[in-house]
């Protein structure tokens, strides 16, 4: 589904990503973990077309994305749920979801996507007329995920969906991710919360100072003392 080859990103003299390569197969949830400042958000922004790599290549279903603008990547089936949620606080839950569906021209499909979101997060259906800014943090994160799903994506890029949430709400987000995988959605999940990533991902990449340091299935990473001590024990 997604192929990343030797992607390098610079912000002026600062090297944010240094030759990052990874693969995400169709129907997989792949975790990308690492400390704050490791480059996770930069990588997702590069994949979504919001940052232009200095080198390397990105392909979606074999199609190179070089020069493809961010809004066109949405039309190709890629959605980014950004860190910080990116909601419109003075608009209702329903209006925020409609904003997520701006690229979908088929009204019947929009209605189907609404039902998909309501089924995934019933609390949003109960609050569809409520202003997004008055929702709890967990409900806002659910709404951000729902808005991403409204574009009818084949792959979703989730940037730190557990940030600032209580453990019980993180559990609800994890359940939602499991249901998305069962429905066949492909996900690249960037997280500092290694437990969440390990619970839902089939494979994990560990990013540090702009480079991939480890890549394996969660079970193997959790048996590696160096990985646990250096990357997992602090999350």
Image (cartoon, rainbow, N blue to C red):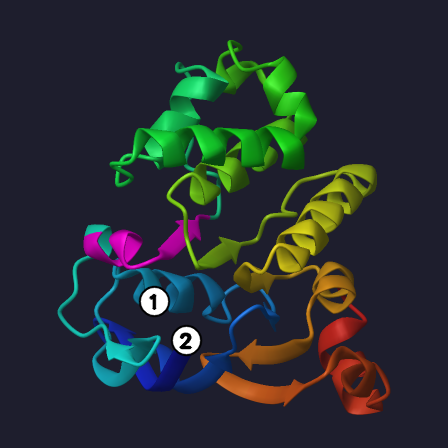
Q: How many marks?
A: 2
Image point (64%, 61%), residue name: 192
Q: Residue 169, image x and y in percent?
A: 76, 38
Image point (63%, 28%), residue name: 139
Q: Residue 150, image x and y in percent?
A: 42, 38
- State if disc 2 and disc 1 touch (CB < 8 Å): yes
Res 39 → quadrant? bottom left
1 or 2: tag closer to the N-terminus = 2
Residue in front for this viewpoint, 105 or 153:
105
Q: Residues under labels 1 and 2: Cα distance?
A: 9 Å
Farthest-out residue, front:
108
Looking at the image, residue 204 lies above or below residue 80 = below
Do we see residue 88 in this rendering?
no
Do we see residue 133 in this rendering?
yes
Looking at the image, residue 73 lies above or below residue 13 = above
Q: Which residues are magenta?
A: 72-82
Looking at the image, residue 202 lies above or below residue 108 = below
Looking at the image, residue 30 lies above or below residue 153 = below
Q: Which residue is mark 1?
A: 47
Mark 1 vs mark 2, foreground winner is 2
Quarter in which the N terminus is drawn: bottom left
Residue in front for this viewpoint, 25 or 43:
25
Residue in front for this viewpoint, 180 or 197:
180
Q: Residue 155, image x and y in percent?
A: 45, 61
The crowd level at tag 2 (other Cα within 10 Å; few <14, some 14-19, many 20+) is many
Q: Which residue is mark 2?
A: 2
Tell me the SS state at disc 2: strand
Farthest-out residue, left:
67
Image point (40%, 14%), residue name: 90
Residue in front for this viewpoint, 150 or 137:
150
Q: Is residue 214 left or right of residue 154?
A: right
Q: Residue 85, image x and y in percent?
A: 48, 39
């Amino acid at each position: 589904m997604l192929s990343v080859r030797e992607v390098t990103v610079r912000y002026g003299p600062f090297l944010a990503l240094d030759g990052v390569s990874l693969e995400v197969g169709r129907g997989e949830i792949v975790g990308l973990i690492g400390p704050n400042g490791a480059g996770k958000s930069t990588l997702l922004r590069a994949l979504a077309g919001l940052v232009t790599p200095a080198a390397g290549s990105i392909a979606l279903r074999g199609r190179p994305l070089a020069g493809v603008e961010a809004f066109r990547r949405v039309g190709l089936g890629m959605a980014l749920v950004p860190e910080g949620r990116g909601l419109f606080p003075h608009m209702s839950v329903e209006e925020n979801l409609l904003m997520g569906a701006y690229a979908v021209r088929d009204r019947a499909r929009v209605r189907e996507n609404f039902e998909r979101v309501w089924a995934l997060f019933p609390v949003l259906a109960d609050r569809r007329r409520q202003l997004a800014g008055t929702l709890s943090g967990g409900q806002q994160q659910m709404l951000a995920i729902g808005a991403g799903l409204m574009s009818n994506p084949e792959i979703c890029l989730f940037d730190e969906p557990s940030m600032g949430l209580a453990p019980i709400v993180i559990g609800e987000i994890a359940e939602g991710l499991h249901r998305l995988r069962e429905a066949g959605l492909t996900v690249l999940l960037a997280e500092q919360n290694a437990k969440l990533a390990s619970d839902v991902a089939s494979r994990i990449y560990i990013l540090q100072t702009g480079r991939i340091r480890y890549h394996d299935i969660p079970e193997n990473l959790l048996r590696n003392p160096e990985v646990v001590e250096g990357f997992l024990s602090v999350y």
